[in-house]
Amino acid sequence: MQKKNNPKKQTSKKPQSPYWKRKINKCCKDAGTYRPDIEPIIDQLADVMRRRDKAVKQFKDEGEQFIVEYENTKGAVNPSKNPLVQQINDLDALALSFWRELGITPRALKGLGEDAVKKNGKKSLSEMLEEL
């Protein structure tokens, strides 16, 4: 009797985003909002930013066309919004929700008090965002 080959269970590993993870960690630490328990949120935001960067690069490589021609099933060609533009907008909105969750947007920092962050010898949010 022959043994059946059991294919190995494939795990879907997300591509790492070390650049963005470092940037986000630095922003959180500078704002005084970093805690080890928020690492999963930081990982998700880093992945969103990596995907956004990839979409922006593709958009630029394809000539930065906001309107593209779309051929429908009947053969008619119509102008349409470039799907990459919508993808970039969606990723921007998703990233913003993560930035807010991490407490490093102007609105979130206002709730904490930007002066309190500066008193601790750390940069203001506006200074951190300029570095991005």
Image (cartoon, rainbow, N blue to C red):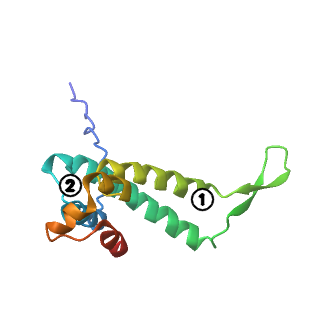
Residue name at image x 44 percent, y 65 percent: 53
Amino acid identity at mark 1: Val
Vertical placement of residue 97 versus 22, above or below: above
- Residue 21, picture quadrant: bottom left
Query: If the image is split into quadrants, where does the C terminus sit?
Result: bottom left
Mark 1 crowd level (few <14, some 14–19, many ≥20, 10 Å Cα): some
Pick the residue in front: 105 or 87: 105
User: Which numbered disc, 1 or 2, marks the residue closer to the eye?
Assistant: 2
- Image coordinates for residue 128, horizontal then vertical, percent: 30, 70
- Image coordinates for residue 55, horizontal then vertical, percent: 50, 62
- Image coordinates for residue 68, horizontal then vertical, percent: 72, 61
Vertical placement of residue 98 versus 51, above or below: above
- Image coordinates for residue 109, horizontal then vertical, percent: 30, 56
Left or right of residue 107: residue 19: left
Mark 2 crowd level (few <14, some 14–19, many ≥20, 10 Å Cα): some
Would you name the residue on which mark 2 appears?
33
Left or right of residue 35: residue 128: right
Q: Earlier in the sequence, mark 1 or mark 2?
A: 2
Amino acid identity at mark 2: Thr
Residue name at image x 29 percent, y 52 percent: 103
Would you name the residue on which mark 1 appears?
85
Disc 1 from disc 2: Cα separation: 32 Å
Q: Secondary structure at mark 2?
A: loop
Vertical placement of residue 113 versus 2, above or below: below
In the picture as drawn, the residue positioned furthest to the top comes out as 1
Left or right of residue 56: residue 126: left
- Residue 73, picture quadrant: top right
**Residues marked 1 and 2 touching at CB (< 8 Å):** no
